[in-house]
């Protein structure tokens, strides 16, 4: 799993007008929710937050927030709001997690190689592009790599055949067909 570290500070500014002035100064408001606990309002340097979020866009990532009061929180991105007219960062929501607890993540499947069956006229049919895995956040892979070069016409790879790291289990149906080579 991707890990990022971002510096932030506790926000003591609230209300529409003060938040607008904060954004004009190049800062973005955010909130960290902690599973039933009280939400923690934060502010980020917009350029830094934007760049870090662009790097992890669409992927699973654990972000380690270094807060100016000396604490650290491990979080996942819950929601990012942008201004549609200006395409600027407007607000971010994060969810605090425990790195020692097992969680579920949707992980993309990356297929590599050219199947033997394709050389013989077969067609590659990709049925699934992601699987759901469960494990400790830092044990979850960024992607599941599947080599299809050994597949002939009529062969398939199911979710249960994907190799997973130790401590990670498949939540998706093991019999689910991910890729197959079909006759033309």
Image: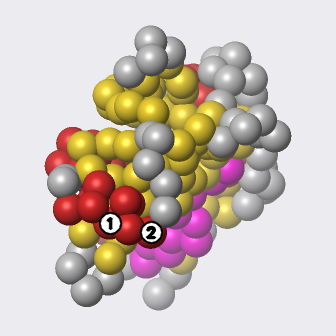
Q: Name the residue nearer the viewer: 120 or 58.
A: 58
Task: Tell me the SS state at disc 1.
Answer: helix
Q: Is residue 83 visible to the viewer in this orientation of the structure?
A: yes
Q: Left or right of 40: which side holds 100?
A: right
Q: Residue at x 67, y 63 (%)?
A: 177
- In the image, residue 165 above or below residue 61: above
Q: Are marks 2 and 1 in contact (CB under 8 Å)?
A: yes
What are the residue bounds of the magenta stretch? 122-134
Q: Quadrant of residue 99?
A: top right
- In the image, residue 120 above or below residue 77: below
Task: Tell me the SS state at disc 2.
Answer: helix
Q: Left or right of 157: which side holds 13?
A: left
Q: Residue at x 43, y 78 (%)?
A: 123
Q: CA distance from mark 2 to mark 1?
A: 6 Å
Position of residue 85 measured from the top left corner of the image (x, y, whole percent): 25, 86
Residue 127, magenta (yes or no): yes
Task: Answer few, some or many: residues within 10 Å of disc 2's Cα (few below 14, many 20 plus, some between 14 and 19).
Answer: few
Q: Quadrant of residue 117?
A: bottom left
The residue labelled by disc 2 is 16
Q: Which mark is residue 46?
A: none
Q: Which mark is residue 20?
A: 1
Position of residue 148 measured from the top left corner of the image (x, y, whole percent): 43, 52
Q: Left or right of 132: which side holds 65?
A: left
């Amino acid at each position: 799993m991707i890990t990022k570290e971002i510096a932030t500070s506790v926000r003591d500014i609230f209300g529409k007008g003060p938040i607008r002035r904060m954004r004009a100064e190049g800062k973005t408001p955010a909130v960290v929710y902690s599973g039933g606990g009280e939400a923690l309002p934060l502010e980020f340097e917009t350029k830094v937050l934007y760049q870090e979020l662009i790097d992890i866009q669409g992927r699973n990532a654990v972000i380690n927030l270094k807060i100016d009061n000396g604490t650290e929180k491990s979080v996942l991105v819950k929601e990012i709001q942008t201004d549609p007219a200006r395409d600027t960062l407007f607000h971010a929501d994060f969810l605090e997690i425990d790195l020692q607890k097992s969680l579920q993540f949707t992980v993309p499947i990356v297929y590599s190689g050219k199947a033997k069956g394709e050389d013989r006229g077969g067609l590659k049919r990709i049925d699934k592009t992601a699987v759901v895995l469960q494990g400790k956040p830092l044990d979850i892979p960024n992607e599941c790599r599947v080599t299809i070069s050994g597949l002939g016409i009529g062969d398939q790879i199911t979710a249960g055949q994907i190799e997973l790291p130790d401590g990670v289990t498949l939540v998706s149906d093991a019999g689910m067909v991910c890729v197959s080579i079909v006759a033309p």
